[in-house]
Amino acid sequence: MRIGITCYPTYGGSGVVATELGIELAALGHQVHFISYSQPFRLTGRDEGIFYHEVPVSSYPLFEFPPYDLALASRMAEVAEFSQLDLLHVHYAIPHSVSALLARQMLAARGRRLPFVTTLHGTDITLVGLDRSYLPITRYAIQESDGVTSISEYLKRKTVEDFGVTRGIEVVANFVNCDVYAPIKDAVQRAEARKRLADPNEAILMHLSNFRPVKRVVDVVRIFAQVVREIPARLVLVGDGPDRSAAEWLAHDLGIHSKIHFMGKQERVNELLPLADILLMPSELESFGLAALEAMACKVPSIATHVGGVPELIDDGETGLLYEVGDVDAMASGALGLLRDPARLEAMRDAGRRTAQTRFCSTLVVPHYVRYYEQVLANQGS
Ligand code: GMT
C-alpha cells in the first residue's frame, strides 16, 4: 500500500506513534509518505520506503495567523496525486482530519479517491476538541472520516459521549517495538551504563513527557523529594516544555536540585529507559500513556495515576501502581515500598515486559492497522 501519514512532528505521543507506525509499515514493505511542516523528530534515518514531504506555510502581512490547515490540505492532495497514495492516515483530529477532508474533496472533484483514517490520541478530544471554537468542525471531520481509530476504549467512550459521534470507532492500542525498547539483560553492562546517571547505591526514578501542565511535572519533583529523603536516589527528567522551569524552581527551593538531571529532549529514549528503576507518570489525564508502555517494555514499572486509559495498560499491583491524581504522599510511599522490596520490584519488572510483548508489541498492533486500512479500502468499492 502507499500510505500518507500526517502528524504533529514535535514532541508528543501522537507524533511518536505516527512515526513508529510509518517505520513499521515501511519495514513490512509498504510505501509511507510523511506530510508535515517539519520532519517528525523520531524519523532520524532515511529508511527504505519512507518519504518526507514538507508543508510550506508562507506568511503574508495580511495573515495574522498563517493558514497551515489549508497549506496542509493542498500538500496532501498533491502528494496523493504525485505519489499515487491509496489512503491518508492522520494522527490527532485537529486540524489534520479537517485538512484531509478538504484534500479528499479536492481530489474527488478531479475523479480521484483519497480515503482517510483519523486516529484520535487524547487531547484532541479531551481538551482541545471540547473548546467550542473547535468542537463542531472536529466532530464533522471525525464523522466524515472513512475510518476512525482511537488508542483506548476510554477515548472511544469519550468521543461518543462528549462529541456525539455516531460512526464506528476501532480501538487500536498504542504499541511498542519490543526489540528496540528492551531491558539491558547483562547486569554488569546495565550497572556500568547507570553510572552516567547515578552512583551505584542510588535508585533511579525517571519521568518522560512534554512537560505540559497535564503531565504534572511538579508532582514528579515532589514525589522524588520524599523518596530521596529516605533513600539514596536520583531523578532523571527527560523532555522539555512549559512546566520545566516550575519544576526547576521547585527543585531548587526543596534543595534537591543536585539530585535531579534535567536532560531536555532526547532522541533515543530507548537507551535511557532501561537504566531506570521506576517511571513516574502522575498525569492529570492520559488517554493511554505511551511513556509507561515504553518503560514496561524496558522492564521499568510505573507509579502512575488511575485516569483515562491508563488502567487499560497498567494492571494495578501487577505491572505498576496506580493512585489518585495529586496524591503525592501515596505515590512517594508506593515508590519507596517497591524500591525497598527487590523481589516485588523484580516480579513487576517481569510482568510489565510480558504484558508489552503479549498485548502491545508492534508485531501485533501494526497488522491491526493494516487490516483496518484494507477494510476501509474495501468499503470504498461498496
Ligand atoms: O500527552 C500529550 O501531551 C501528548 C499527546 C499527543 O497527542 O501527542 O499524547 C496523547 O497521545 C499519546 C499517544 O497516543 C497517548 O499515549 C497519551 O496518553 C495522550 N495524552 C493524553 O491523553 C493527555
Image (cartoon, grey):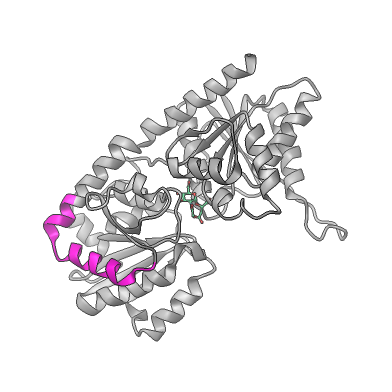
- Residue most extreme to the right: 62
Residue found 87% across the figure and 61% down from its top: 61
Q: Nearer the viewer, residue 75 or 97?
A: 97
The picture places residue 324, in percent across and down from the top left corner, at 35, 62
The picture places residue 211, in percent across and down from the top left corner, at 48, 64
Residue 124 visible somewhere in the drawing: yes
- Residue most extreme to the top: 382
User: Is 342 within the magenta?
Assistant: yes
Residue found 35% across the figure and 75% down from its top: 222
The picture places residue 195, in percent across and down from the top left corner, at 25, 66
Work out which quarter of the rendered image holds the C terminus and state it.
top right
The picture places residue 163, in percent across and down from the top left corner, at 60, 44
Q: Nearer the viewer, residue 180 or 356?
A: 356
The residue stretch that appears in magenta: 326-347
Q: Identify the image quadrant of residue 144.
A: top right
Work out which quarter of the rendered image holds the N terminus and state it.
top right
Where 18 sits versus 84, above or below? below
Q: Is residue 79 left or right of residue 213?
A: right
Q: Is residue 165 left or right of residue 211?
A: right
Residue 152 visible somewhere in the drawing: no
Count of marks placed on residues: 0
User: Is 247 within the magenta?
Assistant: no
Dominant SS in magenta: helix
Q: Nearer the viewer, residue 259 or 124?
A: 124
